[in-house]
Image (cartoon, grey):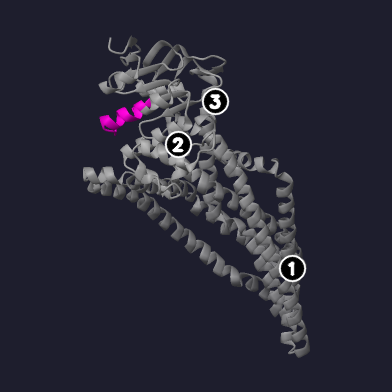
Amino acid sequence: MRIEKLATLKNAWKLAKGYWVSEERWRARGLLAAIVALNLGIVYINVLINAWRNTFYNVLNERNKDGFISALGDFSLLAGIFIVIAGYQLYLRMMLTIRWRKWLTKQYLGDWLSNQTFYRMKLVDRENTDNPDQRISEDINLFVSHALTLSLGLLREGVTLVSFIVILWHMSGTLEIPLGQTVFVVSGYLVWAAIAYAGLGTWLTVKLGKPLVSLNFIQQRYEADFRFSLMRLRENSESVALYKGQQEEEKNFIARFQQVFGNYWKLMNLNKRLTWFTAGYGQLSIIFGILVAAPRYFANKISLGEMFQIADAYGTVQSSLSFFIDSFTQLAEWKAVIDRLGQFSTNMEKVQTLRNEVAEPEIRRQAQLELAVEELDVLRPDGHRLLADFSLRLLPGESLLVSGPSGCGKSTLLRALAGIWPFGRGTITFPADKQAFFLPQKSYIPIATLRQAIGYPGLTRPVEDDQLRLVLEECRLSFLAGRLDDMEDWAQVLSLGEQQRLAFARVLLQQPDILILDEATTALDEPTEQQLYRLLKERLPQAILISVGHRSTLFQYHQTKLELDGRGGWTILPVGA
């Protein structure tokens, strides 16, 4: 348990420290200093209000009208200052929260997107890499907001505790406890009563609420899995409808939601028991200060005003001592967030470590014309060899068709050429000043305007609208020519065949020097496929072309054929041989 706590603190420090030593450190520290100063101002106002209570209730007891009106004026001034300070304190804290979240989100996005980490994490540690979208969008927000709320709350309550313990100690006097012939004198007995009451309450709360941490962690995971399954149906609605798979999907949804429901039921029962205790603890706190101060009041040692001042000071001390009780649910949620973000960071680091320690195909760029592959081995994650000692050289204008049985490693070879497949060894050398473009079977289309979707991930040169419309027409997408600035989820609007034609439009606009296609025409009829390949040959006559495909109609657009057997063997033959 102690090791687990240290690990949580280590992860929290690791997550937090970067921002405070970053390029924004002075702005962040300045905001924090202002927020701390305002919190201390709130504590000081509360001390003044506590003293005001003595005066106010004494003038009430004396039926002093002038004193009553004067006391109301004093309170109005204190309350007005308190409201202004509280408003600015909240405003600056929210400003610091969003700036810290922005910086931390940028760091996580950078780590996740660098070196294809987002892709490699699925290959290396699929089981422990759950819902990275939730980690970045939700958990970072919770970490930052809870970190500031809890740390500033602890500071404020700590200063409040010291301030009001001094007040309570001076007003407690002594308590005489006769035991036989001996009388025990307890100084500051109200302070000791508050500490004992809050200490017992804190211990019981921790004992009762300890399972909240793991239950909150699991709940967030189940919620994200359920949400993701719903998104999957939305993204694949046509396929499910064609399969008439709605009943199976409903069963899957209910099964996933049953996990949400079952864990939430545990949370519900635990929170019920915890709330029973904390609510009872809070209700008793309301009168506990008066009860312990009553003996001195009835002994005529304190006035009515002092009685209420003591009650207020006792309540404030008890509230400060109960900070962990009142914040336990938030602390449990924060720990779960730290654990999830820590695990996410560890998984990303594991990918980078593997990249540095494990041999993988080396991608080079040199001043040469040809694309060269030398002594390339391609493996599956389990170590099975898909391709062994493979070498190839392609000059500008040359083309290669890759074929072989399903699962033999055709697509994996292209991933190795793209530099995203980490399992293997060998050297792949690209011409230094040439652009390579990879076209998968299902191209990614962002939620954006059609203009942006065609140009994804970014055109290297400006393109006129007339040229965009011409390319769409050549790719048999003329019906989209008038929608260049329409914002849509084009992956849902367009059929798979239309998406593949849009991908060819990208190629014609990008005009790459090396083009690698992974079964990029499987959803197209043969006449459309032939038209698009003819366009590639006409517009990009000097491009190096590598295609994965099974149709014999592709032979006429390639000079050489590479056949894989899936056991490491390979053969290069002229097309038609």
Q: Earlier in the sequence, mark 1 or mark 3?
A: 1
Closer to the camera, 83 or 23?
A: 23
Secondary structure category for the residue under label 1: helix
Percent from the top left, x then y, of residue 38?
Answer: 73, 61
Disc 2 marks which residue?
Answer: 129
Q: CA distance from mark 1 to mark 3?
A: 53 Å
- Measure the alpha-carbon separation of dots 2 and 1: 49 Å
> In this view of the protein, which residue sits in the foreground, 102 or 167?
102
Is residue 227 inside the magenta stretch? no
- Residue 359 % position (x, y): 50, 17
Q: Earlier in the sequence, mark 2 or mark 1?
A: 1
First to last magenta residue range: 517-534
Q: Residue at x 76, y 70 (%)?
A: 48
For label 1, the residue is: 45
Circle 3 residue = 353
Q: Secondary structure at mark 2?
A: loop
Numbered badge on residue 532: none
Q: Amino acid at mark 3?
A: Thr
- Residue 178 is situated, as x and y percent measured from the top left of the image, at 69, 68
Please determine whether, in this image, residue 147 is positioned above or below residue 366.
Answer: below
Q: Is residue 527 a member of the stretch shown in magenta?
A: yes
Left of 79 or right of it: where is 354? Answer: left
Q: Quadrant of residue 43?
A: bottom right
Look at the image and tell me whether residue 492 can be seen: no
- How many circles with numbers are drawn on the protein? 3
